[in-house]
Amino acid sequence: MGLVNCSLGKGSLGGLCSLLALLLMASPVPAQVLLADDFNDGNAAGWTEFDGSFSVQNGEYVIATSGFCNDGRTVTGDPTWTDYGIDVDFYVESTQPGAHAAVLFRVESIVPGCDAGKYYLAVVYPDHVGFCRVNFSGGSCSILKQATVATAPQTWHHLRLLVSGVGATLTIDDTDVLSYSGFIDYPAGRIGVKSVNTQTVRYDNVLVQGPGSLWSDLGNALAGTGGAPGLVGTGQLLPTT
């Protein structure tokens, strides 16, 4: 984007300058899609799996686990990713206590074992959501923030996670449910999904977008005395930014 000096007044040249500025400012930023996988190709190529049992069934990524601390995790993406938005659909098949879906973000490292690695988690239980940090914990995820939110199992839900700088906002079914600013340990990393203990979780329609791709110019600006306004949004849609 460039800056336009429109100091020519309101005559024909001034109007042309205003139009040029509007065109420059209103030009949509190309969507920066970092990753898109709907699993309709019947495989999970590009994903690295740890523990658990993994399969692609009917265009869905299925993660099944068989016991305590059998943390089925699978990751993909680029370790240099910093700020991004993650969209994913999830379906928790299990109704037992503790069954939940989880999205990994800023995965710095990950290895086989009981939640072994360095990464953050956004977790969605039937009665609450939360952010936590894993640091080769051996099964313990350090809780950063939680909120009481009802998310019924055995139903498809849509999760969106927007990560920018030290902050992140979690949205479930188009409702913002949790925000936190304190993700300072791991500044960059891959993304992933998870199933834990004795449960099965299905994931689908994974989309990761980079900065600048979450804004759209809707057009139809109403012209004033100085012409139609040109507004541009940049960055992630997070509180206080």
Image (tube, helix red, strand yellow):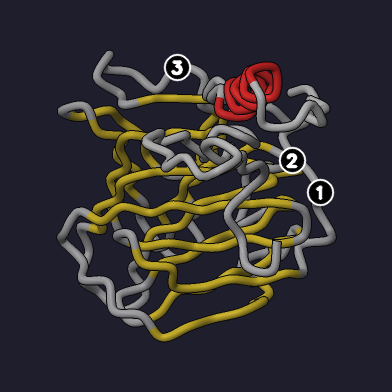
As drawn, 207 above or below 116: above
Q: Nearer the viewer, residue 125 or 11?
A: 11
Q: Which quadrant of the rendered structure holds the N terminus?
A: top right
Q: Amino acid at mark 2?
A: Thr
How many residues crowd mark 2 within 10 Å: few (<14), some (14–19), many (20+)? some
Residue in the image at 58% along x and 71% along y? 179
Let me know if residue 195 appears in the view. yes
Is 38 or 213 nearer to us in this picture?
213
Callouts 2 and 1 close, C-beta under 8 Å: yes
How packed mark 3 is, by other alpha carbons closer than 10 Å (few <14, some 14-19, many 20 or more), is few
Location of mark 2 (residue): 82
Q: Are marks 3 and 1 in contact (CB under 8 Å)?
A: no
Instruction: Please tell me which of labels 3 and 2 falls first in the chain.
Output: 3
Q: Which residue is mark 1?
A: 187
Distance of label 3 from label 1 (alpha carbons): 26 Å
The answer to whether 193 appears left or right of 158 in the picture is right
Which secondary structure, mark 2?
loop
User: Do the CB atoms of the residues marked 3 and 2 lie less than 8 Å apart?
Assistant: no
The amino acid at mark 1 is Pro
What type is the residue that disc 3 sits on? Answer: Ala
Where is mark 3, residue-wise?
45
